[in-house]
Structure formats: structure tokens, C-alpha cells
Image: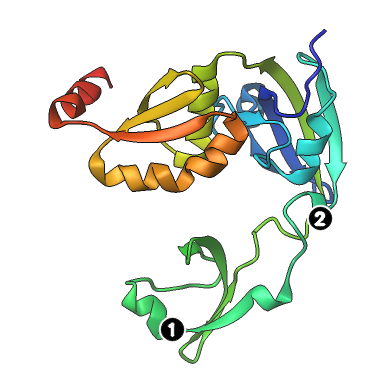
Amino acid sequence: MVVVQNSDFVEIEFTGKFKDTNEIFDTNSKPEIDKKKLNFEAKSYVICVGKGMSIKGLDRDIEGKEIGKEYSAEFSPEDAFGKRNPSLVRMIPLKFFIEQKIMPQKGMQLSLDGAIVKVISVSSGRVLVDFNNPLAGREVLYTYKLVRKLEDVKEKVNSLQDFFFKKRFDFDVKDKEVTFKVEENLKRFIEMMAKPFADILGMKIKAEAITKKEEVKQEEKK
């Protein structure tokens, strides 16, 4: 029996539903996706327990559970995607969107100032926009299975790359140090993310610029 502890890296298969409607808002479960023909991707999802890589309630609930077993839990808005904040509903001049070559329409979701926002209404040269998380204010239900616990350091690094970088770079691991091999213009990006990455992994993070020749080799490997 393998029991999950804080700071363990685990692969999780999950399905999230709204408590009031039972509607699925997120899942990576292939059986669920295939059965209901859902528009989600059945891909591996790895988190480091207790490090904020999932909603607060789920992050806490996973600790102490067994690998290979299925569980279910419900979470309040505070432990899920937060309460709705009325101050995050704002009026923005229409010309701002036009300058960005966007024609806003009621119900549209778009990226604004690094956040996903929803257009509530458009009238008289003004646009009412909701900056709240689209899932804020909802009670949710999760069913999940802890598939496996990760032990390999390289797998852990790649799971954090997926979470922080949304892409994978080549890297070396030596003496509790991870060195990413990136183009010169990406070194600053790696350095900016080094602290949260290192805090979770417990290893020092460095970025090393690669030469053009090494760049070509990396592309050939892909």
C-alpha cells in the first residue's frame, strides 16, 4: 500500500462537475470522455501534492490517500475556484477592444491582461467585462484516482515544465541541480520561474544558453 504524502508527485485521473447541475467542466478520464463524447483531452496530469498545482480542496484531499484507489469529494467555492467578486466586473471603453482588433460580443470569452474574461454586455461604446474566474462561485464535485507516484527526477522536472512553462526544454540533472538548455532569449524566462520551480522540486534551477549547432540538434531530436 502506497499512501500519498505532502510534496509527493502523483499522476491523477479526475473528473470535475458542478454540484448543482452535475455538468462536467473538466476531465482527463478517457472512459468518461469516450462514454459521453466530451471535448476534453485524455492526457496524463501530474501534480506535486500541497504545492498549489490544483484547487485548494483537492490539493488537501489527496494527502493521505492510497495509490490505485478511487475517491470523490465536494468543495465549496472557497476551496475550489473562489467566490465571485463584484469588483471584478468592470466597464471598459469599446475603443480599447477595437485597438486590439477585437469586436466583443455578449457571452464571448477572451484573454485580457493575462486573464480569461467574459463579456457581459456591449452598449453605447462601452463593454461590461467580468474578470472573475469563469468557475468562481460554484460548488464542485470531484471524482479522482491516484494512478501512480512518480519517483524519477526527470519525470518530475517534465511535469513542472508542463505546469510552469507549458512546453518542454532539454535539461541536465546533476548534484541536486537542474540546468535547462535554452536559446539565449529564453534564459530570462527560465530565471524568472526558477524560484517557484525550485521550491517545489527542492533543487537549484539554472539556465544555460545553447549554440546554434545545439539548437539544430534539439530540433532534430523532436
Camera-side residue: 3 or 200? 200
Camera-side residue: 50 or 102? 50
Q: Is residue 99 left or right of residue 134?
A: left
Above or below residue 118? Residue 52 is above
Above or below residue 192? Residue 30 is above
Q: CA distance from mark 1 to mark 2?
A: 33 Å
Residue 39 seen in the current view: no
Outermost front residue: 175
Q: Residue placed at 64% from the left, 76% from the top?
A: 89
- Mark linked to residue 67: none
Image coordinates of residue 200 in percent, x first then y, are: 61, 34
The tally of labels here is: 2
The residue identified by callout 2 is 78
Camera-side residue: 110 or 1? 1
Q: Quadrant of residue 64?
A: top right
Residue 205 seen in the current view: yes
Instruction: Locate the N terminus and report the quarter of the image it occupies.
Output: top right
Colour theme: rainbow
Badge 1, how many Cα within 10 Å: few under 14, some, many 20+?
A: some
Amino acid at the residue labelled 2:
Glu
Image coordinates of residue 156 in percent, x first then y, are: 55, 23
Mark 1 element type: helix
The residue identified by callout 1 is 94
